[in-house]
Amino acid sequence: MPTRNEINALREKTETYLVDVLMPFWMERSVDKEFGGFLPYFDRDGRPTGETAKTYLSQVRMLYAMASTHRAGYGNGRCEELSRWAADFLLKHLWDEKNLGWVWIADRRGAPTVTAKVGYGQVFGLYAFSEYFMATNDERGRIAANRTYDAIFKHMADPRNGGFFELFHPDWRLERPGKYGGDRKSMDVHMHAMEALTSYYEMTGDPSHRERLLEVIDLVIRRMLDPKFGTGYIQFTPDFKPLPAILFSVDWGRDAKPVDGVARPLNFTSYGHNVEFAWLLLHAADVLGQPRDTYREVVGRIFDHCVSYGIDWELGGVFVEGPQNGPTQLTEKQFWQQAEVLVGMLDAHAMFGGEEYWKAFCNVHAFVFNKFIHLPGGGEWFERLARDGTPIDDALGHGWKICYHTMRSMVQCTRRLKALSGQAA
């Protein structure tokens, strides 16, 4: 088991990097002083690429990142200022006052260019503005969270099968089936709905919001996790039959395409998403006032699956995805899975003990600091690496990649390492 000195050394390395490198990268480079909001596009050298589109997701995740980091006690007030800066742009430009809900992409000035309603974006709005209000007491945050919650449950909720539909026209008509996504649901959106409802309930304390959170938790556990392996499927029919996961026509990030160009195999699961769900579920239990042991079996199976198949024990880091029932042949590594598994393995170690979880954390931590973090470019993480750490996609920032995963991971890891240090011999 780790000693206090070992834990403290990792805690100091993590927190020093957060405060002296990662936070300054974004606070000093990304603010669009001319038109508001943030310009998150940076090449491997940390230089602006010249791209100026403002995806809703980049702006709302900057809101969350700055608000939550301020709430955690960092930034000496600068993170609070930037969270207000983010809120100003979002509220002025990206809320659809006519139809309600958040639009998907705007130009640099804030004029919407893609006005589709994407469920993933709506739940992030609930998450970020709930966090923003708790961090700043700015009443606009509470109002925006309430309006987002109302839009989600008015337009996204499926009264027949439960859960949420996810892809819509600007006026909330459900999108077409197939590649347009109107006939699919995902674990991704439901996991983030759980995350958002956790913060929203923390903000409001309303018993009805507690019930909604418990409903989503129950739905994910019962309908979205494989009963044999305990790991998550990626996409589903409206009544939650698992489907091979496809990429949608709406522009949505820089994830790698399926090997065959069409769909991922049905039994593929994401190690990073599974572990992210597990640690977010434990956090939800804390907010709900439940013992963490309530979900001991659920999270234990997820943590063990990642340790067995997701961790690259030879070269370090976490693979992107693979079969539920065995090792993966896909050996690329993407930045956000590393960030989430770092947090999850610390929760696993604290909850279950066991040397394997601590070793998994140390494995991924070393790979991140040795391979993903690009200090010559200013200290953000590469988007995607080959198994040995060679960059495949060397962007440090783009319209779908800001500091949401990386900064949150460093804040959460520092918090957990401090707690473990207090318990160590």
Image: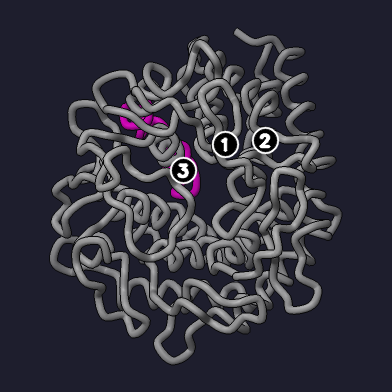
Residue 280: which disc? 3
Give the number of the mark in front: 3 or 1.
1
In the picture of the structure, the residue carrying the numbered disc 1 is: 339
Classified by dominant secondary structure, the portion drawn in magenta counts as helix
Vertical side of 298 occupied by 64: above or below: below
> Which comes before the other along the chain, label 1 or label 2?
1
Identity of the residue drawn at 48% across and 55% down: 253
Q: Are marks 1 and 2 in contact (CB under 8 Å)?
A: no
In the picture of the structure, the residue carrying the numbered disc 2 is: 415
Residue 380 position by quadrant: top right
| Residue 283 lies in the magenta-colored region | yes
In front here: 420 or 24? 24
| Residue 286 lies in the magenta-colored region | yes
Q: Secondary structure at mark 3?
A: helix
Q: Where does residue 423 sit, x and y in percent of width and height?
A: 65, 19
In front here: 117 or 358? 117
Separation (CA) of disc 3 from disc 1: 13 Å
Identity of the residue drawn at 69% across and 49% down: 43
Residue 129 in sight in this render: yes
Separation (CA) of disc 1 from disc 2: 14 Å
Residue range highlighted in magenta:
279-300
**Horizontal placement of 61 versus 274: left or right?**
right
Residue type of the residue flagged with mark 3: Leu
Residue type of the residue flagged with mark 1: Ala
Give the number of the mark in front: 1 or 2.
1
> Which comes before the other along the chain, label 3 or label 1?
3
Q: Secondary structure at mark 2?
A: helix
Residue 13 position by quadrant: top right
Q: Where does residue 354 sit, x and y in percent of width and height?
A: 48, 11
Q: Where does residue 350 sit, x and y in percent of width and height?
A: 54, 23
Residue type of the residue flagged with mark 2: Arg
Q: Are marks 3 and 2 in contact (CB under 8 Å)?
A: no
